[in-house]
Image (cartoon, rainbow, N blue to C red):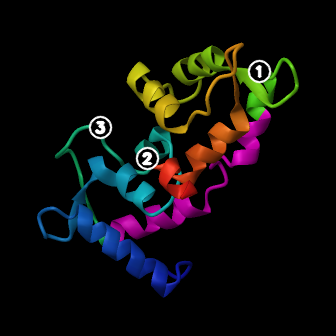
Amino acid sequence: MADLKSYEVEECRACFEVYDTTGEGKIDAHYLGSLLRALDLSVTEETVKKHGGTAKLGEKMLSFEEFLPIYSDVKKAKDIGQIEDLLEGLKVYDKNENGTMMAAELAHVLLSLGEKLVDKEVDEIFTSCCPPEDEDGYIKYETLLKNIFAGPFPAEAKE
């Protein structure tokens, strides 16, 4: 691919080979989203589906040559949310205009808007990323977003 640098292609190849469980040079399209995320791209399930990802195992296989244009396209996409965009969105819920919102309201948002999460996923986010609530049930949403953007283990990232 002309728009990818050689080191990017090699990084893609290394990750692709991890998901190539059969050693035949193909991955199951079910793992497309996981592979893109392993390459540090933030993708929604809708984006994965649009690029050929499947919900069930064994429906479709992708070769490395088919994967590279997908990676390139997703990498160039402008619809990937940044922390600033999310901060602006959460300001709607900041009734006191002090950088806080009700934790219960955040849980409701995560369960009902956009790419909806399930209770277990919300609990995991609150357990691993959410700052402690104050005595009135408010949390600092900027701290939460920074923890989420830090990666899967924000406590380790701080050390």
Report if the CB atoms under discs 3 and 2 are less than 8 Å apart. Answer: no
Sequence-wise, the earlier of marks 2 and 1 is 2
Sequence-wise, the earlier of marks 3 and 2 is 2
In this figure, which residue is indicated by the disc labeled 1? 93
Gap in angstroms between the C-alphas marked 2 and 1: 29 Å
| Residue lying at the far right of the rendered structure | 97
Percent position of residue 145, x then y: 64, 41
Report if the CB atoms under discs 2 and 1 are less than 8 Å apart. Answer: no
Percent position of residue 124, x then y: 43, 31
Identify the magenta region: 65-88
In this figure, which residue is indicated by the disc labeled 2? 48
141, 86: nearer the viewer = 141
| Kind of residue at badge 3 | Ala
Sequence-wise, the earlier of marks 3 and 1 is 3
Q: Which mark is residue 55?
A: 3
Q: Quadrant of residue 89?
A: top right
What residue is at 16 percent from the left and 46 percent from the top? Answer: 58
| Kind of residue at badge 2 | Val
Residues packed near mark 2 inside 10 Å, few (<14), some (14 to 19) or many (20 plus)? many
Q: What element carries label 2?
A: helix
What residue is at 58 percent from the left and 28 percent from the top? Answer: 114
